[in-house]
Image (cartoon, rainbow, N blue to C red):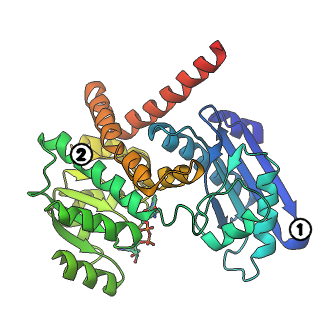
């Protein structure tokens, strides 16, 4: 029952667009536009069923509403999915069809790249609609801004735990040394932190060992490192039944999306006294960067806005402490509160 699915988390709109001649089947989910137009990337994936695609689009759209709300952006949450094999060679027709689907919503939804899509695909979308961000040559690679947001968020977590955000005595275990992980290591090294790192790519490890004096460990060893902070910057679901037993960390603060395998793992971290910086709050630098693109911000201004992740997280940690709830729950409440307050304001005009 589609309306039941939409009603469960108050999604506003679910749009389907089909151009069978071109092999295009797309779904756009809009969760909430109270704070502004719904922004969220396009995922290109071979879903097992149409229902799986709908569920994913709805779930991801809602996540974007929360991310934008806590980051203090005037944006709502949306997401789109294209159903199919994302390795397809002839992409122009598919992404132009997607651009037409986005355009049909008249700006209520703004898209960007996501899993299975690239900035080049977004150029094809741009041929049909202006409601697309993350275009090559505009705001550029968001990763340095994301990494900066993770860096300040990690400092906020250390400050909450120890009373000081000086990182010179802090040992951080970084998993994943790609676009975000590399920049995070750079910021941490400059702040005097000690680094233990892992990746599946030997070259990336060698670079961080050479440039920042990091110690390298195997991909499975990272979970048991005796460090103050674990910064997951590779995969999702790294906080799970198995890894949690190995953790010696006091803090988890990293860029990866969907770090908790299940939401109960937030409670499990809370019960073990591990301070968790909710992923969608600490990694909001990416969405801040594309928001800057919409408003012609300079790179410096986007970075400054990402610096606000420090205070956002401090507030979440304090609420969680005061109410005795996991940090993820405190973050969700903060997002819901901002949206609710804006709704009340709108009604009173
Ligand atoms: P990336 O692909 O550039 O880097 C990921 C790195 O993880 C790669 O170096 C890869 O080799 C490594 N890796 C893969 N599997 C691994 C494993 N099992 N163990 C250790 N390392 C492994 O991606 P990215 O852009 O740096 O993003 C990292 C994470 O942050 C992703 O989860 C992404 O969704 C999230 N994120 C990124 C941004 C952004 O601006 N790039 C914004 C928000 C969230």
**Image quarter for residue 186?**
bottom left
> What residue is pinned by disc 2?
157
> What residue is pinned by disc 1?
20
- Which is nearer the N-term, disc 1 or disc 2? 1
Q: Nearer the viewer, residue 9 or 263?
A: 9
- Ligand 1 is found in the corner quadrant, namely bottom left
Residue 255: x percent and y percent? Answer: 38, 58
Residue 204: x percent and y percent? Answer: 33, 81
Task: Please say if 48 is above or below 321.
Answer: below
Is residue 61 shown to the viewer in this render? yes
**Image quarter for residue 92?**
bottom right
Whole-angstrom CA distance, mark 1 to mark 2, is 50 Å
Binning the other alpha carbons within 10 Å of mark 2 as few (below 14), some (14 to 19) or many (20 upward) gives many
Furthest residue in direction top, as rendered: 348
**Quadrant into which the N terminus falls:** top right
183 on left or right of 246: right
Residue drawn at x 71%, y 36% is 12
Ligand 1 within 8 Å of disc 2? The answer is no
Task: Please say if 240 is above or below 347.
Answer: below
67 on left or right of 306: right
Task: Please say if 88 is above or below 129.
Answer: below
Residues at marks 1 and 2 touching, judged by CB atoms closer than 8 Å: no
257 on left or right of 117: left
* In this rendering, the label closer to the viewer, 1 or 2: 2
């Amino acid at each position: 029952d589609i309306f039941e699915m939409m009603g469960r988390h108050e999604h506003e709109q679910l749009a389907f667009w089909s151009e069978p001649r071109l092999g295009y089947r797309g779904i756009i989910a809009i969760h909430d536009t109270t704070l502004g137009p719904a922004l969220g990337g396009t995922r290109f994936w071979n879903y097992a069923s149409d229902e799986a695609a709908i569920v994913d689009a709805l779930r991801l759209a809602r996540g974007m509403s929360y991310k934008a709300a806590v980051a203090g952006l005037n944006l709502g949450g949306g997401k789109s999915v294209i159903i199919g094999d994302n390795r397809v060679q002839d992409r122009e027709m598919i992404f132009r069809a997607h651009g037409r689907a986005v355009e049909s919503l008249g700006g209520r939804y703004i898209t960007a790249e996501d899993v299975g899509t690239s900035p080049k695909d977004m150029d094809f979308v741009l041929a049909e609609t202006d409601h697309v961000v993350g275009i090559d040559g505009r705001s550029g690679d968001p990763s340095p801004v994301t990494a900066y947001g993770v860096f300040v968020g990690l400092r906020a977590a250390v400050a909450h735990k120890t009373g000081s955000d000086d990182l010179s005595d802090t040992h951080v275990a970084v998993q994943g040394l790609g676009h975000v992980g590399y920049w995070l290591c750079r910021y941490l090294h400059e702040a005097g932190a000690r680094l233990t790192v892992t990746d599946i790519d030997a070259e990336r490890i060698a670079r961080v060992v050479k440039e920042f004096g990091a110690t390298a460990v195997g991909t499975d060893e990272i979970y048991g490192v005796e460090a103050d902070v674990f910064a997951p910057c590779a995969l999702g679901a790294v906080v799970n039944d198995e890894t949690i037993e190995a953790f010696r960390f006091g803090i988890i603060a990293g860029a990866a999306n969907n770090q908790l395998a299940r939401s109960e793992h937030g409670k499990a971290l809370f019960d073990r006294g591990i301070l968790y910086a909710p992923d969608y709050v600490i990694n909001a630098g990416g969405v801040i960067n594309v928001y800057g693109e919409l408003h012609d911000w300079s790179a410096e201004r986007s970075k400054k806005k990402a610096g606000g992740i420090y205070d956002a997280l401090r507030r979440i940690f304090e609420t969680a402490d005061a109410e005795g709830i996991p940090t993820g729950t405190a973050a969700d409440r903060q997002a819901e509160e901002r949206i609710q307050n804006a709704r009340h304001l709108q009604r009173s005009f």
